[in-house]
Amino acid sequence: MSGQRRAIAAAGIVLLGALLAAGWLDARVQQESPTALKTAADAPGLEKPAAARPAKERMAVTVILAWVWLSIVVLLGFLRLRVREADRVHRMGLHRAGEGAPKGPGH
Amino acid sequence: MKALAAWIEDRLGLRPVAAFMAKKEVPCHKHTFLYYTGSSILLFLGIQIVTGVLLAFYYRPTLAEANVSVVRIMTELPLGWLVRSVHSWSATLMIALVFVHLLGIAFTKAYRKPREATWLTGVLLLGSSLAFGFTGYLLPWDELSLAATKVGTNLPKALPVIGPWLTQVMRAGEDVTGDTLSRFFILHVCVLPLALLAILGIHVFLVQRHGMSVPLEAERDKIKLPALPFWPNFLFREAGVWLVLLGILLTIAVFMAPGVGPQADLMAPAPEGIKPEWYFLFMFQTLKLFPALILGLNGEMIAVLVMMAGMAAVLLLPFIDNRPFERKGKIVTALAWAGLAYALGMSIWSLL
């Protein structure tokens, strides 16, 4: 199997895993009973600062975070390809190819 | 589209800038990674501006409403806690990167001629970043932030002649009150951003004007280092770094969101275990080490003067070490290492 195919297969597995994880997390959130918000104002003298938030929002953010990381990995893959291409062009000196060319009328 | 581009070009004349960017090259050597810190600082600054504006929509800088509005942002507004967490953590990461950036420049001696002004503006940017941190710390108006601000604004008082006046200016009065909160808020969202953007503009211009520095050996031996075109080779690499940093920031912000303590009470005694932000810890610990009296003089005053002398030495480093660029400067390197070890040691000690 070539490196490219392996990368695509790995990305597919990660994507599928993320989808399954998202579904599992969402199912857990729906099973949970809704919890009331507790603010710092309601709990005076609280040593640990109150940062309560709905469980559903917390779960949603965690799932989104997983997607963010997945997007970052995919984008890094694209960037790597672009960097390699740009470096190849640079090594071959093609990035300066147009500099010495005679300019047409109107320039 | 071409007509629009021509219209913009006629008005703004951006072609020389584009031509400059197209020709700009980045030297490749063992310290190239330091070049990424500058743009990463800008990334975090941009994130702070965006999240700061979002927070300012709901934050109320008054004695009665400051803490309540922060609690509201964190518990009632959709993703408010995340916006605040990203704002807070991006500030922390930005300041950490500013330290890394500055230390990298100190170790590589990149502050020497002709880059003295770049260093000066860089140190001023560090100062503005720390001022952002200091003013922002009070805004949640909880017990800890009030106590820490009282300690912080009390420091200049130890200075002879101008000390009490400086403290009064910082506090907008004799003590930390609602006026101090308003003052810090205006400084945080208006004065400091304007100052920082102005200094940043000069700093970026100077970096472009003098180009990126190269290692001392290459400068001394006149070695022609390989270079990468800024566009697109280096910028794509930078984009990769930004993406990873963005992921790290979001992850930390989600899992380590800062909270908010009980509303500050001006009449209440200071709570136990007051600690400033991590970047002030070494100064805090240093102050604690100084005795009340040294040779009959006020110990706190001497501590403040010693710290001010240290800051002045950092600011004026290019004029203290003004040797030719290619000289190694082992003393400055040793002092920079000693300073770093001292700051780290004191910070850890303060946390224990």
Image: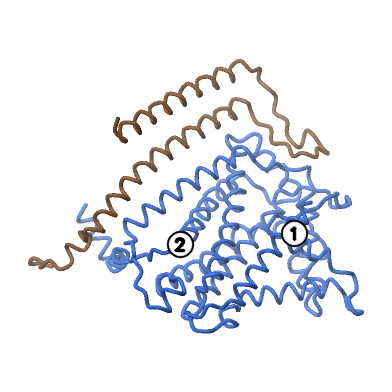
Q: Residue furthest top?
A: A31
Residue drawn at (40%, 74%) of the image: B209
* Pointers 2 and 1 within a single chain: yes
Q: Which mark is residue B179?
A: 1
Residue drawn at (80%, 53%) of the image: B274
The three-letter code of the residue at mark 2 reads Tyr
Which chain is mark 1 on?
B
Picture quarter containing residue B169? bottom right
Left or right: B304 as drawn, with respect to B202: right
Residue B323: x and y in percent read 53, 84
Q: Which mark is residue B197?
A: none
Left or right: B148 as drawn, with respect to B29: right
Q: Colour of chain A?
A: brown
Earlier in the chain: of badge 2 and badge 1, it is: 2
Badge 2: residue crowd in 10 Å (few <14, some 14–19, many ≥20)? some
Q: Colour of chain B?
A: blue
Left or right: B258 as drawn, with respect to B246: right
Residue drawn at (60%, 58%) of the image: B95
Which chain is mark 2 on?
B
Residue B261: x and y in percent read 76, 43
SS at circle 2: helix
Report the Cα–Cα distance between label 2 and label 1.
Answer: 41 Å
Residue drawn at (42%, 27%) of the image: A15
Badge 1: residue crowd in 10 Å (few <14, some 14–19, many ≥20)? some
Picture quarter containing residue A37? top right
The reply to whether residue B306 is in sight is yes
Report the residue marked by disc 2. Answer: B35
Q: Nearer the viewer, mark 2 or mark 1?
A: 2
The reply to whether residue B13 is in sight is no
Q: Residue furthest left?
A: A105
